[in-house]
Image: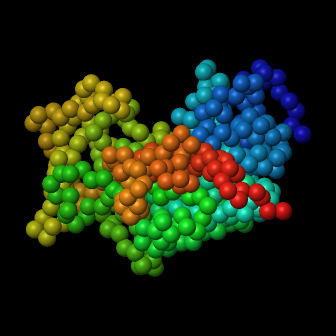
Amino acid sequence: MTPKLTMKERLAIPRQSMPEQNATDRSRNFGEVNLGFPEQVAMLEAQRCLQCKEAKCVRGCPVLVDIPRFIRCIAEGDFAAAAKILLNDNALPAVTGRVCPQETQCEIECVRGVKSAPVAIGYLERFVADWARQGGRNLVNQAAPPSGRKVAIVGSGPAGLTAAGELVKSGHDVAVYEALHQPGGVLVYGIPEFRLPKKIVDEEVGRLVQAGVKIECNAVIGRTYTLGELRERFDAMFIANGAGLPVFMQVPGENLKGVYSANEYLTRVNLMAAYEFPQADTPVLVGRRVAVVGGGNVAMDAARTGKRMGAEESMIIYRRTRTEMPARIEEVHHAEQEGIRFELLTAPVEVLGNDQHWVTGLKCQRMQLGEPDASGRRRPVPIPGSEFVVDCDVVVVAVGTRANPLLTATCPDLALDRRGNILVDASGMTSLPGVFAGGDIVRGAATVILAMGDGKRAARSIDAYLQTAPGAQRQP
């Protein structure tokens, strides 16, 4: 048992740093960058938590993890209790402990952050999740008695997996349909190995399967099965197929060879293991100079991937300043450490190519910031006569995604907004009774944890719906 510290002693403990791979070494490999807290460091960091009576950090968590309780257990050295608390609230803690933007969610609400650094909630979450999975400990929570009700979930990304985990705990028979050949959605095709090892996702999914979730891959809803067919077979549905249709810049030359959407580029490398080609079946262009357009986490992932693939230079082209970048501060910092070049206040106006239609460069224009736009960020304004050319042979466009109409086009009764996202009511139900939706297909491209929050809320709504629908009595 760790001795209790006084308030003064707690306040004197500085935030603990995350051990990580050396920047030079890691820029040449796909091993995980962050290495995780050792036990004693985790316990020390946990003792920084003031155990506030009104835990604002919980309010900042989209899946409402009982943060003070699991951190208190870490401080006391009771890691098993911490893991049970965490797993009860969070279906994918080893994932969110790595990729959730805690600095803008739970940690920004931490009282310690007023006068010093907030408690490293994300690092502690990762520590507990890794402790549980590395020890092979069976911490699956006991499910409720079978309800006799069947729920179909479209998509095995963070929203779908979270909903599945919650619903199977409530005793429902849950089947997840995944279009790709491997479950995980954006967790396996969009996030690189060096940020989220695929083994972690596999183990998290495996734990859900152990709890009773059934997953069918290579099932494209809208082609393999229609929504109508699933509605006939299931008592309720949750649509969480994401927003995987790439958005391009709409500038001349985007059809040249050597231009990728970030979706294709990262999917080839992450899901299809193109970094191991020719041992893997899927190739990808290894550019001498890679230019990535965008300033979000996806752009950072693509630029850092380009560097690891062997590019002499990998760069970010972004039309605002670093302050306006939507990427996580840690990801920008890691990119800088790894030698990624940043061309800020810069907007592409044309992709240049040679007679063989291969990319040779990116014509850009310098920008300055004007008045704020609808996003609240200052609008980039072109500077006349400031055009210049960035030498590159691969261009990766990471300026966003939108809803793929493959599923929704086959169901005209499903109400959509003007951008093709599914409309839902306050409970998460669509215009079709018993059909719910959440994640990026509703809110547009967002973070993993926001999608998980949607999945958890939808699961509660589905459970309530099933309890009031005909034949809702649980089986003995």
Q: Find the residue positioned furthest to the front.
A: 470
What is the tally of numbered marks visible in this picture?
0
Q: Position of residue 257 (x, y in %)?
A: 22, 66
On the image, which quarter does residue 108 sit in?
top right
Q: What residue lies at 48% left-to-right and 64% top-to-bottom?
A: 227
Q: Position of residue 132 (x, y in %)?
A: 75, 55
Q: What residue lies at 49% left-to-right and 53% top-to-bottom?
A: 432
Q: Is residue 153 above or below residue 428?
A: below
On the image, which quarter does residue 290 sit in?
bottom left
Judged left or right of residue 136, residue 217 is: left
On the image, which quarter does residue 319 sit in?
top left
Q: Nearer the viewer, residue 257 or 9?
A: 257
Q: Position of residue 144 (x, y in %)?
A: 79, 56
Q: What residue lies at 53% left-to-right and 53% top-to-bottom?
A: 433
Q: Which of the image's four quarters has the N terminus?
A: top right
**Residue 470 in view, yes or no:** yes
**Residue 35 in view, yes or no:** no
Q: Find the residue positioned furthest to the right.
A: 1
Q: Which of the image's four quarters has the C terminus?
A: bottom right
Q: Nearer the viewer, residue 87 or 317?
A: 87
Q: Nearer the viewer, residue 158 or 458?
A: 458
Judging from the image, the colouring scheme is rainbow
Q: Position of residue 379 (x, y in %)?
A: 27, 31
Q: Is residue 259 above or below residue 85?
A: below
Q: What residue lies at 33% left-to-right and 31% top-to-bottom?
A: 374
